[in-house]
Amino acid sequence: MNDKTIAQLTKVLLDVMFYLGILLCVTIPLTFRWLGQYYPNIADHYLVMCILFISAGILGIGILRELRRIFATVLAEDCFVWENVSSLKRMAYMGFGISLITACRLFFVLTPATIIVIGVFFIAGFGSYVLSQVFRQAVTYKQENDLTI
């Protein structure tokens, strides 16, 4: 499989995840009503859990939206553009937001998975921010090089 095929498959996977994410966010209230029968913590804090999960889900969908935009530039073979710098920076802020929202869940339900999610999205936020700086430098070099030619 060549790189272009892998990028196209990744774009399809991102599209599927994006639309499934929207569907999951919309169905959280119904899903949590049903899960509340089996998990008392969800039933006891139904409204708060819905708000926290929907908020984190919206940010997750935002991250997927930015990744889809970035992959569109990869497929167009023009990925060192200012739009990708902005997308990576927005992804960083959304990752930090998911960490903060998930940290709020610790007041209601303390689980190891919650702590792991906080750490993963916090690190992902920093990773995206660093990548935005790398892309910023690459775009600057590219523009200087284009002016030279």
Image (cartoon, grey):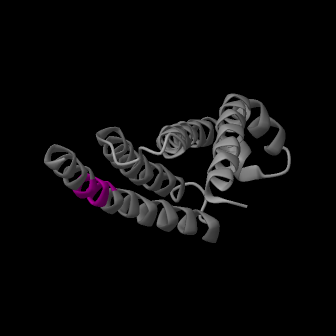
User: Toward the viewer: 42 or 14?
Assistant: 14
Q: Main secondary structure of the magenta part?
A: helix
In magenta, the rendered stretch is 132-138
Q: Position of residue 76 (x, y in %)?
A: 50, 39
> In the image, residue 85 lies at what x, y percent?
32, 46
Given residues 99 and 129, the one toward you in this image is 129
* Quarter of the N terminus within the rendering: bottom right
Q: Is residue 128 left or right of residue 25?
A: left
Is residue 118 toward the left or the right of residue 8 in the image?
left
Residue under the image location 75 percent in, 39 percent down = 32
Residue 52 in percent (x, y) is at 54, 42
Magenta region includes residue 137: yes
- The vertical placement of 119 against 70, above or below, is below
**55 versus 141 height, above or below:** above
Residue at the front extreme of this rendering: 149
* Labels in figure, total: 0
Drawn side of residue 79 relative to residue 53, left or right: left
Q: What x and y, as percent, mark residue 95?
A: 44, 52
Q: Say if 20 sits above or below 108 in the image.
A: above
